[in-house]
Image: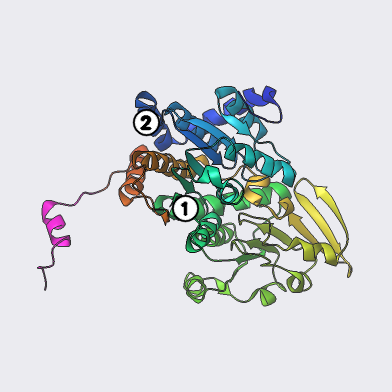
Amino acid sequence: MEFKVKDVSLAEKGELKIAWAEKHMPVLMLLRRKYSEIKPLKGIRVGAVLHVTKETAVLTLALLEAGAEVYLAGSNPLSTQDDVAAVLAERGIHVFAWRGQTSDEYYWCISKVAESSPDVVIDDGADLHALLHEKYVNVAENVVGGTEETTTGVNRLRALESSGLLKYTVIAVNDSYTKYLFDNRYGTGQSTFDGILRATNILVAGKTVVVAGYGWVGKGIAMRARGLGARRVIITEVDPIKALEAVYDGFEVMPMSKAAKVGDIFITATGNIAVIRKEHFEKMKDGAILANAGHFNVEVWIPDLENLAASKRTIMPNVTEYELFNGRKLYLLAEGRLVNLVAAEGHPSEVMDMSFANQFLAVKYIVDNKGRLPKAVIRIPRELDEMVARLKLEAMGIEIDNLTPQQKEYLFSWRHGT
């Protein structure tokens, strides 16, 4: 079987990690058990580019047991858990991933997935989708459909759709309620600080935390900063509605040009480029910490940081010290990449349970509806989203009410007034 990982002898350790994730992902495990018997994905090849973590292992093994052949590459050069990749190689996944890839190695791995001619594509950031549409158009023509996990990836795919070039249906799993309301907010909010604290062991209490972007990720980060005792939590935004929401949520809002002067910890979560750049670095206090929670390492603009630096050194794993020409020192975490996945382990299994249950159901939905879906970016059907929520509640031992026949009639009738 074709695969490439760092060291297959690491599998024993990886098995323990995966067992932990399986214990904390009850919804996906229920789907895995259910569909391992009837194998609705038999004969389907799934090509996936995802962070190769213990949670991703649970998803890919569920797809495998449902009958699919799975090709997998990592969606970040530094996020792969090598012991998990070793397990997947042993279990029958065609995995091409190891931590510490060069850019060329990263795209070689994604190319291996594209060259497998997948029927269904799962992506995290849209690098696989983009490669299929740029270099492997003949493969893209035969793709039944795909999914996308991230806000960044969905934005790229909508741009592809608006240009009229999208070759197949893409379900924006990121836009499902049981993904962005929980994964983006609670998952990223917690795991971002997990990464920052593992890298630095700093005390958040008493510090000023600047969060760039107040989407669902930014909301989660701001919430956790406040909970950890930050003296001030400042939001920077370009969207007036999100900025107003941040104000009403009790946070300070100001431009980055002003926040740069007072922040101790800066965290980007915008999905955009050069959010923190030269004019901001020049204003920062000595010792400021820079971290990114967006998908690509472009939000903290490293070329400007390199140009401003008289010297740089790695002082701890995932901490690079830049000494500027004026003597001040700035600290970049995780090379500007996703701090929660590079310096920590990514989202908790409990929240990825919902995100990856959506991914599994989206793949099955694409296969079940082959030839009937538009070449467009669409949302997962509401009933599947709600099913994931209900299963999660049941797994947590929580009951909710049901509408009575009278209530249903009232809600769906236009005749009732005052």
Label 1 crowding class (10 Å Cα cut-off): few <14, some 14-19, many 20+? Answer: many
According to the picture, the residue beneath numbered tag 2 turns out to be 40
**Residue 183 against residue 119 in the figure, above or below:** below
Q: Can you give x and y, in whole percent of width and height, for residue 328 in the image?
A: 84, 66
Q: Is residue 236 magenta?
A: no
Choose between 263 and 122: the one closer to the eye. Answer: 122
Nearer the observer, disc 2 or disc 1? 2
State the predominant SS element of the stretch in magenta: loop
Residue range corresponding to the magenta coloring? 401-418
According to the picture, the residue beneath numbered tag 1 turns out to be 174
Question: Quadrant of the rendered structure where residue 236 is?
Answer: bottom right
Q: Distance between the residues labelled 2 and 1?
A: 24 Å
Quadrant placement of the N terminus: top right
Q: Which residue sits at x=74%, y=52%?
A: 335
The answer to whether 50 appears left or right of 400 in the picture is: right
Type of the residue with mark 1: Asn
Label 2 crowding class (10 Å Cα cut-off): few <14, some 14-19, many 20+? Answer: some
Type of the residue with mark 2: Pro
